Amino acid sequence: MNSPHQTKLVNGFTLLEVLIALAILAIVMVSAIKITADNINNLWYLENKTLAAIVASNHAVQLRLETAKPETADGWDEMAGRRWYWQIKRHVSDLSGVWRYRIEVFLEGDKQPLVSLLSDVAEI
């Protein structure tokens, strides 16, 4: 028979242990969410940088194919559901018979170019 002074052993966690476990879990989850958000931002930036480089390369090829070599040009392209503003400026090259062009590509709304490409083109 059990005496009234005997204590019963109870299995389980105390409230303090549960709160500490929840606090640790919350810290880990916040860190994981921040890392995921940073990765998403980096992916967005790299995707835009890649698309801007493609736009710049396309205009470098067009400059080489066209007979008229403009001193400056600009315009808008659409690629991957985004609008890209591009500018072309001609510079004198160190090589005779060659123009050096700087092609800058901006994502719509940005003030700084995502890509700046130098391309040498024959003066023909």
Image: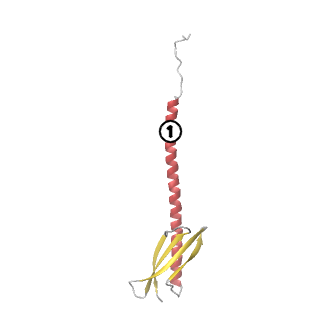
User: Residue 27, image x and y in percent?
Assistant: 49, 43
**Residue holding disc 1:** 23
Instruction: Please tell me which residue is depicted at 50% across the width and 82% down the height of the picture.
Output: 72
70 vs 50: above or below: below
Furthest residue to the left? 94
**Residue at figure coordinates x 53%, y 87% from the top left:** 68
Counting from the top left corner in percent of width and height, residue 66 is at 54, 85
Q: Residues within 10 Å of mark 1 (few under 14, many from 20)?
A: few
Residue nearest the viewer, comparing 112 with 117: 112
Residue 124 placed where, x, y %? 48, 89
> Which residue of the protein is positioned furthest toward the bottom in this rendering?
124
Question: Tag count in the figure?
Answer: 1
Measuring 50% from the left and 63% from the top, which residue is drawn there? 46
| Chosen colour scheme | secondary structure
Residue 112, percent across and down?
49, 69
| In the rendered image, the vertical position of residue 90 relative to residue 116, given as above or below | below
Residue located at (49% from left, 84% from top): 71
Amino acid, disc 1: Ala
Instruction: Provide the secondary structure element on which disc 1 rests.
Output: helix
Q: Quadrant of the N terminus?
A: top right
Question: Residue 81 occupies which quadrant of the picture?
Answer: bottom right
